[in-house]
Image: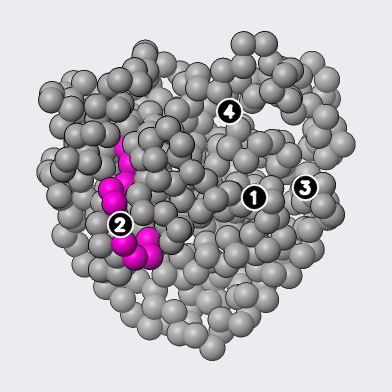
Amino acid sequence: MLGRRHQSHYYIKMVKSFQAIVLCVVVISCRGAKADDTAQKWSPRNKYWRHLLKEQSGLDDGNGEHFDDMQSCVETALSESNDVVLQDKTAVPTIVDTLTDSQNRTVLVEIGNAITPSQVESVKRLAACTKLYFPESRFDHREFTMSGGGNDCTFMNILLQIFSPEVFENVINIAKLAYKKAGWGEQLRLRPPHMCGLRTAEYLNYKEFKRLGGHADTGSLFSVLFALSDPKLYQGGEFYLLPRDEPDNRMYYFKPRQYSAIVFLSETHHGVTDLEGPREMFTNEFWVYDDAPWHSSTRAENSEMDWFVQRAEETLDHAADYYKEEDLTDLWPFEEDIEDFDGYDSGYGFYEDESSDDELNAIEDKNDEL
Protein backbone atom coordinates (compact mmCIF):
# COMPACT_ATOMS: atom_id res chain seq x y z
CA MET A 1 0.00 0.00 0.00
CA LEU A 2 1.36 3.44 -0.86
CA GLY A 3 1.91 5.64 2.19
CA ARG A 4 2.22 9.38 2.74
CA ARG A 5 5.38 10.86 1.32
CA HIS A 6 5.89 7.44 -0.21
CA GLN A 7 8.82 6.99 -2.53
CA SER A 8 9.50 3.88 -4.56
CA HIS A 9 12.52 1.82 -3.65
CA TYR A 10 13.92 0.14 -6.65
CA TYR A 11 17.12 0.55 -8.57
CA ILE A 12 17.58 0.80 -12.29
CA LYS A 13 20.49 -1.16 -13.69
CA MET A 14 22.19 0.70 -16.51
CA VAL A 15 24.55 -0.48 -19.21
CA LYS A 16 26.17 1.54 -21.97
CA SER A 17 24.98 0.56 -25.39
CA PHE A 18 24.56 1.93 -28.88
CA GLN A 19 21.83 -0.63 -29.55
CA ALA A 20 19.16 1.77 -28.32
CA ILE A 21 20.09 4.25 -31.04
CA VAL A 22 20.05 1.56 -33.69
CA LEU A 23 16.67 0.34 -32.51
CA CYS A 24 15.21 3.83 -32.55
CA VAL A 25 16.50 4.56 -36.05
CA VAL A 26 15.06 1.31 -37.36
CA VAL A 27 11.60 1.48 -35.88
CA ILE A 28 10.95 5.19 -35.65
CA SER A 29 10.85 5.60 -39.41
CA CYS A 30 7.29 5.49 -40.63
CA ARG A 31 8.24 4.86 -44.25
CA GLY A 32 7.76 1.38 -45.62
CA ALA A 33 5.74 -1.64 -44.62
CA LYS A 34 7.47 -2.28 -41.29
CA ALA A 35 6.32 0.95 -39.66
CA ASP A 36 2.88 0.55 -41.17
CA ASP A 37 2.66 -2.96 -39.75
CA THR A 38 3.78 -1.69 -36.36
CA ALA A 39 1.12 1.00 -36.33
CA GLN A 40 -1.53 -1.53 -37.32
CA LYS A 41 -0.48 -3.88 -34.53
CA TRP A 42 -0.24 -1.38 -31.71
CA SER A 43 -2.97 1.03 -32.80
CA PRO A 44 -5.93 -1.22 -33.58
CA ARG A 45 -8.32 1.70 -33.19
CA ASN A 46 -6.59 3.84 -35.79
CA LYS A 47 -9.28 4.09 -38.46
CA TYR A 48 -9.54 7.88 -38.17
CA TRP A 49 -5.83 8.54 -38.81
CA ARG A 50 -4.51 5.49 -40.70
CA HIS A 51 -4.76 7.44 -43.97
CA LEU A 52 -2.02 9.82 -42.78
CA LEU A 53 0.45 6.95 -42.55
CA LYS A 54 -0.60 5.30 -45.79
CA GLU A 55 -0.50 8.50 -47.82
CA GLN A 56 2.53 10.02 -46.04
CA SER A 57 0.67 13.33 -45.89
CA GLY A 58 -2.22 15.11 -44.21
CA LEU A 59 -0.48 16.66 -41.18
CA ASP A 60 -1.89 20.11 -41.87
CA ASP A 61 -3.21 22.34 -39.10
CA GLY A 62 -4.18 25.13 -41.48
CA ASN A 63 -0.63 26.45 -41.77
CA GLY A 64 0.75 24.04 -44.35
CA GLU A 65 1.55 20.35 -44.80
CA HIS A 66 4.21 19.08 -42.38
CA PHE A 67 4.37 15.30 -42.72
CA ASP A 68 7.76 15.34 -44.47
CA ASP A 69 8.97 18.09 -42.14
CA MET A 70 8.14 16.00 -39.11
CA GLN A 71 9.71 12.92 -40.66
CA SER A 72 12.92 14.78 -41.42
CA CYS A 73 13.01 16.53 -38.05
CA VAL A 74 12.68 13.31 -36.06
CA GLU A 75 15.23 11.44 -38.17
CA THR A 76 17.71 14.34 -38.09
CA ALA A 77 17.44 14.53 -34.31
CA LEU A 78 18.18 10.83 -34.10
CA SER A 79 21.19 11.00 -36.41
CA GLU A 80 22.62 13.94 -34.46
CA SER A 81 22.45 11.87 -31.28
CA ASN A 82 24.59 9.06 -32.68
CA ASP A 83 27.64 10.61 -31.04
CA VAL A 84 25.95 10.40 -27.66
CA VAL A 85 26.14 7.13 -25.76
CA LEU A 86 22.68 6.49 -24.35
CA GLN A 87 22.37 4.33 -21.30
CA ASP A 88 19.69 1.70 -21.68
CA LYS A 89 18.56 -0.61 -18.95
CA THR A 90 18.55 -4.37 -18.90
CA ALA A 91 15.91 -4.73 -16.17
CA VAL A 92 12.35 -5.51 -17.20
CA PRO A 93 9.28 -3.49 -16.08
CA THR A 94 8.40 -4.46 -12.51
CA ILE A 95 5.34 -3.85 -10.35
CA VAL A 96 6.50 -1.68 -7.45
CA ASP A 97 3.30 -0.91 -5.56
CA THR A 98 -0.46 -0.51 -5.75
CA LEU A 99 -3.00 1.76 -4.09
CA THR A 100 -6.53 0.67 -3.22
CA ASP A 101 -9.46 2.83 -2.15
CA SER A 102 -11.83 2.39 0.78
CA GLN A 103 -13.90 -0.07 -1.25
CA ASN A 104 -10.85 -2.23 -1.97
CA ARG A 105 -10.68 -1.15 -5.61
CA THR A 106 -7.20 -0.72 -7.03
CA VAL A 107 -6.97 2.85 -8.30
CA LEU A 108 -3.23 3.07 -9.05
CA VAL A 109 -0.35 0.80 -10.01
CA GLU A 110 3.29 1.92 -9.89
CA ILE A 111 5.74 0.26 -12.27
CA GLY A 112 9.51 0.52 -12.19
CA ASN A 113 11.76 0.33 -15.25
CA ALA A 114 8.76 1.37 -17.34
CA ILE A 115 10.53 3.35 -20.07
CA THR A 116 14.10 3.20 -21.36
CA PRO A 117 16.46 6.20 -21.55
CA SER A 118 16.44 5.93 -25.35
CA GLN A 119 12.64 6.02 -25.40
CA VAL A 120 12.75 9.09 -23.18
CA GLU A 121 15.00 10.74 -25.76
CA SER A 122 12.54 9.78 -28.50
CA VAL A 123 9.69 11.41 -26.57
CA LYS A 124 11.65 14.61 -26.06
CA ARG A 125 12.69 14.78 -29.73
CA LEU A 126 9.16 14.20 -30.92
CA ALA A 127 7.94 16.93 -28.57
CA ALA A 128 10.57 19.37 -29.87
CA CYS A 129 9.66 18.65 -33.51
CA THR A 130 5.96 18.95 -32.75
CA LYS A 131 6.40 22.32 -31.09
CA LEU A 132 8.57 23.48 -34.01
CA TYR A 133 6.02 22.72 -36.75
CA PHE A 134 2.77 23.05 -34.80
CA PRO A 135 3.51 25.83 -32.29
CA GLU A 136 -0.05 27.11 -32.14
CA SER A 137 -2.19 24.02 -32.57
CA ARG A 138 -0.16 21.46 -30.61
CA PHE A 139 1.47 23.46 -27.83
CA ASP A 140 -0.24 25.08 -24.88
CA HIS A 141 1.09 27.13 -21.98
CA ARG A 142 -1.69 25.53 -19.99
CA GLU A 143 -2.95 27.16 -16.82
CA PHE A 144 -5.41 25.42 -14.53
CA THR A 145 -7.53 28.46 -13.76
CA MET A 146 -9.86 26.76 -11.25
CA SER A 147 -7.35 24.86 -9.15
CA GLY A 148 -4.12 26.76 -9.87
CA GLY A 149 -0.77 25.91 -11.43
CA GLY A 150 -0.37 24.27 -14.80
CA ASN A 151 2.25 23.02 -17.23
CA ASP A 152 3.67 23.57 -20.70
CA CYS A 153 1.99 20.85 -22.73
CA THR A 154 2.95 19.51 -26.15
CA PHE A 155 0.16 17.36 -27.61
CA MET A 156 1.59 14.40 -29.52
CA ASN A 157 -1.33 12.03 -30.09
CA ILE A 158 -1.31 10.63 -33.66
CA LEU A 159 2.27 11.91 -34.06
CA LEU A 160 3.34 9.45 -31.39
CA GLN A 161 1.74 6.50 -33.17
CA ILE A 162 3.16 7.50 -36.57
CA PHE A 163 6.70 8.64 -35.75
CA SER A 164 7.47 6.78 -32.52
CA PRO A 165 5.53 3.50 -32.76
CA GLU A 166 8.01 1.71 -30.49
CA VAL A 167 7.29 4.20 -27.71
CA PHE A 168 3.55 3.80 -28.16
CA GLU A 169 3.99 0.02 -28.11
CA ASN A 170 5.67 0.43 -24.74
CA VAL A 171 2.84 2.65 -23.47
CA ILE A 172 0.35 -0.09 -24.36
CA ASN A 173 2.46 -2.80 -22.70
CA ILE A 174 2.84 -0.81 -19.47
CA ALA A 175 -0.90 -0.11 -19.41
CA LYS A 176 -1.63 -3.80 -19.94
CA LEU A 177 0.72 -4.77 -17.11
CA ALA A 178 -1.06 -2.39 -14.73
CA TYR A 179 -4.50 -3.45 -15.97
CA LYS A 180 -3.76 -7.09 -15.22
CA LYS A 181 -2.27 -6.36 -11.80
CA ALA A 182 -5.17 -4.12 -10.78
CA GLY A 183 -7.85 -6.51 -12.03
CA TRP A 184 -9.69 -3.67 -13.73
CA GLY A 185 -11.29 -6.08 -16.16
CA GLU A 186 -12.83 -8.39 -13.56
CA GLN A 187 -13.36 -5.76 -10.89
CA LEU A 188 -14.60 -2.74 -12.85
CA ARG A 189 -15.46 -4.25 -16.25
CA LEU A 190 -13.13 -1.81 -18.01
CA ARG A 191 -11.95 -2.83 -21.45
CA PRO A 192 -8.24 -3.74 -21.77
CA PRO A 193 -5.81 -1.07 -23.01
CA HIS A 194 -5.21 -2.65 -26.42
CA MET A 195 -8.96 -2.32 -27.08
CA CYS A 196 -9.05 1.34 -26.07
CA GLY A 197 -8.29 4.39 -28.17
CA LEU A 198 -5.64 6.97 -27.29
CA ARG A 199 -7.38 10.18 -26.28
CA THR A 200 -4.23 12.23 -25.74
CA ALA A 201 -0.45 11.88 -25.44
CA GLU A 202 1.28 14.82 -23.79
CA TYR A 203 4.84 15.89 -23.02
CA LEU A 204 4.67 18.02 -19.86
CA ASN A 205 7.26 20.51 -18.66
CA TYR A 206 6.90 22.42 -15.39
CA LYS A 207 9.70 24.93 -15.93
CA GLU A 208 7.32 27.89 -16.00
CA PHE A 209 4.93 26.53 -13.37
CA LYS A 210 5.41 25.75 -9.70
CA ARG A 211 2.56 23.31 -9.11
CA LEU A 212 -0.38 21.53 -10.72
CA GLY A 213 -3.75 22.03 -9.10
CA GLY A 214 -5.94 19.08 -8.21
CA HIS A 215 -8.13 17.75 -10.98
CA ALA A 216 -9.37 14.56 -12.60
CA ASP A 217 -8.80 13.35 -16.17
CA THR A 218 -12.55 13.18 -16.59
CA GLY A 219 -13.80 11.22 -19.56
CA SER A 220 -10.83 8.86 -19.78
CA LEU A 221 -10.55 5.31 -18.44
CA PHE A 222 -6.97 5.22 -17.24
CA SER A 223 -3.94 7.50 -17.41
CA VAL A 224 -0.34 6.34 -17.91
CA LEU A 225 2.22 8.80 -16.56
CA PHE A 226 5.97 8.30 -17.13
CA ALA A 227 8.61 10.10 -15.07
CA LEU A 228 11.28 11.48 -17.41
CA SER A 229 13.23 13.52 -14.85
CA ASP A 230 15.48 12.51 -11.98
CA PRO A 231 13.57 13.58 -8.83
CA LYS A 232 16.87 14.66 -7.27
CA LEU A 233 16.91 17.57 -9.72
CA TYR A 234 13.81 19.24 -8.33
CA GLN A 235 12.45 20.01 -4.88
CA GLY A 236 8.87 19.18 -3.99
CA GLY A 237 6.82 18.28 -7.05
CA GLU A 238 5.25 15.24 -5.44
CA PHE A 239 2.40 13.54 -7.24
CA TYR A 240 -0.62 13.26 -4.96
CA LEU A 241 -3.79 11.29 -5.34
CA LEU A 242 -7.09 11.23 -3.46
CA PRO A 243 -9.12 8.04 -3.93
CA ARG A 244 -12.87 8.55 -3.95
CA ASP A 245 -14.63 8.11 -0.57
CA GLU A 246 -11.29 8.06 1.25
CA PRO A 247 -11.85 8.57 5.02
CA ASP A 248 -10.96 12.12 6.10
CA ASN A 249 -10.04 12.91 2.48
CA ARG A 250 -6.66 11.29 3.03
CA MET A 251 -4.25 11.91 0.18
CA TYR A 252 -1.23 9.84 -0.84
CA TYR A 253 2.04 11.43 -1.92
CA PHE A 254 5.13 10.13 -3.66
CA LYS A 255 7.85 11.12 -6.09
CA PRO A 256 8.19 8.54 -8.86
CA ARG A 257 11.74 7.53 -9.71
CA GLN A 258 13.09 8.39 -13.14
CA TYR A 259 11.95 5.92 -15.86
CA SER A 260 9.05 4.67 -13.71
CA ALA A 261 5.34 4.94 -14.51
CA ILE A 262 2.16 5.35 -12.54
CA VAL A 263 -1.03 4.04 -14.09
CA PHE A 264 -4.25 5.16 -12.42
CA LEU A 265 -7.98 5.40 -12.95
CA SER A 266 -8.31 8.70 -14.75
CA GLU A 267 -11.22 10.11 -12.77
CA THR A 268 -9.32 9.88 -9.49
CA HIS A 269 -8.50 13.34 -8.09
CA HIS A 270 -4.77 14.08 -8.42
CA GLY A 271 -2.22 16.87 -8.77
CA VAL A 272 1.36 17.99 -8.11
CA THR A 273 2.60 19.84 -5.02
CA ASP A 274 4.72 23.01 -5.10
CA LEU A 275 8.04 22.47 -6.82
CA GLU A 276 11.33 24.09 -7.74
CA GLY A 277 13.50 22.79 -10.55
CA PRO A 278 13.07 20.90 -13.84
CA ARG A 279 10.27 18.32 -13.88
CA GLU A 280 9.34 16.55 -17.13
CA MET A 281 6.61 13.96 -17.55
CA PHE A 282 4.98 12.03 -20.40
CA THR A 283 1.29 11.25 -19.95
CA ASN A 284 -1.20 9.24 -22.01
CA GLU A 285 -4.94 8.83 -21.53
CA PHE A 286 -7.06 5.99 -22.88
CA TRP A 287 -10.81 6.09 -23.45
CA VAL A 288 -13.66 3.99 -24.84
CA TYR A 289 -13.55 5.51 -28.32
CA ASP A 290 -11.16 5.05 -31.23
CA ASP A 291 -8.01 7.17 -31.36
CA ALA A 292 -9.04 10.80 -31.67
CA PRO A 293 -8.59 12.06 -35.27
CA TRP A 294 -5.77 14.42 -36.22
CA HIS A 295 -8.05 17.37 -36.89
CA SER A 296 -9.89 17.07 -33.55
CA SER A 297 -9.28 19.40 -30.64
CA THR A 298 -5.99 18.68 -28.90
CA ARG A 299 -7.70 16.90 -26.03
CA ALA A 300 -11.03 15.79 -27.45
CA GLU A 301 -14.07 15.68 -25.20
CA ASN A 302 -16.49 12.78 -25.04
CA SER A 303 -19.37 14.85 -26.37
CA GLU A 304 -17.27 15.91 -29.38
CA MET A 305 -16.27 12.33 -30.13
CA ASP A 306 -19.85 11.13 -29.73
CA TRP A 307 -20.96 13.68 -32.31
CA PHE A 308 -18.10 12.83 -34.66
CA VAL A 309 -18.68 9.06 -34.47
CA GLN A 310 -22.39 9.49 -35.10
CA ARG A 311 -21.74 11.58 -38.21
CA ALA A 312 -19.06 9.14 -39.38
CA GLU A 313 -21.49 6.24 -39.04
CA GLU A 314 -24.02 8.11 -41.14
CA THR A 315 -21.75 9.33 -43.93
CA LEU A 316 -18.66 7.13 -44.36
CA ASP A 317 -18.19 3.94 -46.33
CA HIS A 318 -17.23 1.48 -43.63
CA ALA A 319 -16.19 -1.13 -46.13
CA ALA A 320 -13.32 1.09 -47.24
CA ASP A 321 -9.79 0.02 -46.32
CA TYR A 322 -9.17 3.45 -44.85
CA TYR A 323 -10.62 6.93 -44.98
CA LYS A 324 -9.10 9.98 -46.63
CA GLU A 325 -8.53 13.30 -44.91
CA GLU A 326 -11.24 15.01 -46.94
CA ASP A 327 -13.68 12.35 -45.74
CA LEU A 328 -13.07 13.27 -42.12
CA THR A 329 -12.21 16.95 -41.80
CA ASP A 330 -15.72 18.34 -42.07
CA LEU A 331 -17.17 15.81 -39.62
CA TRP A 332 -15.59 17.21 -36.46
CA PRO A 333 -18.06 19.45 -34.61
CA PHE A 334 -17.83 23.00 -33.44
CA GLU A 335 -19.01 23.63 -29.91
CA GLU A 336 -22.16 25.32 -31.15
CA ASP A 337 -23.02 22.16 -33.13
CA ILE A 338 -23.61 20.19 -29.96
CA GLU A 339 -26.80 20.78 -28.05
CA ASP A 340 -26.19 20.60 -24.30
CA PHE A 341 -22.44 20.45 -24.92
CA ASP A 342 -20.94 18.41 -22.08
CA GLY A 343 -17.20 17.94 -22.15
CA TYR A 344 -17.12 16.24 -18.78
CA ASP A 345 -19.25 13.15 -19.27
CA SER A 346 -17.21 10.15 -18.18
CA GLY A 347 -18.72 7.88 -20.81
CA TYR A 348 -18.64 4.78 -18.63
CA GLY A 349 -19.82 5.75 -15.16
CA PHE A 350 -17.16 4.33 -12.84
CA TYR A 351 -17.79 7.33 -10.62
CA GLU A 352 -21.48 8.13 -10.69
CA ASP A 353 -21.19 11.72 -9.53
CA GLU A 354 -18.61 14.46 -9.43
CA SER A 355 -17.23 16.17 -6.34
CA SER A 356 -18.73 19.56 -5.73
CA ASP A 357 -16.62 22.70 -6.03
CA ASP A 358 -16.78 23.13 -2.24
CA GLU A 359 -15.41 19.61 -1.73
CA LEU A 360 -12.56 20.16 -4.19
CA ASN A 361 -11.70 23.53 -2.66
CA ALA A 362 -11.56 21.90 0.78
CA ILE A 363 -9.24 19.23 -0.58
CA GLU A 364 -6.92 21.85 -2.09
CA ASP A 365 -6.89 23.83 1.19
CA LYS A 366 -5.90 20.69 3.05
CA ASN A 367 -3.16 19.96 0.53
CA ASP A 368 -1.77 23.49 0.97
CA GLU A 369 -1.64 22.94 4.73
CA LEU A 370 0.34 19.73 4.25
Give the mark, 1 or 3, whose residue is nearer the N terminus.
3
Q: Residue 24, how many percent across, how many down?
A: 56, 70
First of labels 4, 1 by sequence position: 1
In the picture provided, is 297 more to the left or to the right than 272? right
Which kind of residue does numbered mark 2 sit on? Answer: Leu
Residue closest to the eye, 361 or 312: 361
Of the image marks 4 and 3, the number of the one nearer the N terminus: 3
| In magenta stretch: residue 273 | yes
Q: How many residues crowd mark 4 within 10 Å: few (<14), some (14–19), many (20+)?
A: many
Q: Secondary structure at mark 4?
A: loop
Q: Secondary structure at mark 1?
A: loop
Foreground tag (2 vs 4): 2
Work out how far the residue at label 1 is from the one at label 2, CA to CA, in angstroms.
25 Å
Q: Which residue is mark 1?
A: 138
Q: Indicate which disc, 2 or 4, sits on the residue closer to the N terminus.
A: 2
Judge left or right: residue 277 versus residue 320.
left
Q: Which residue is mark 2?
A: 275
Point out the image quarter for the N terminus: top left
- Label 2: which secondary element: strand
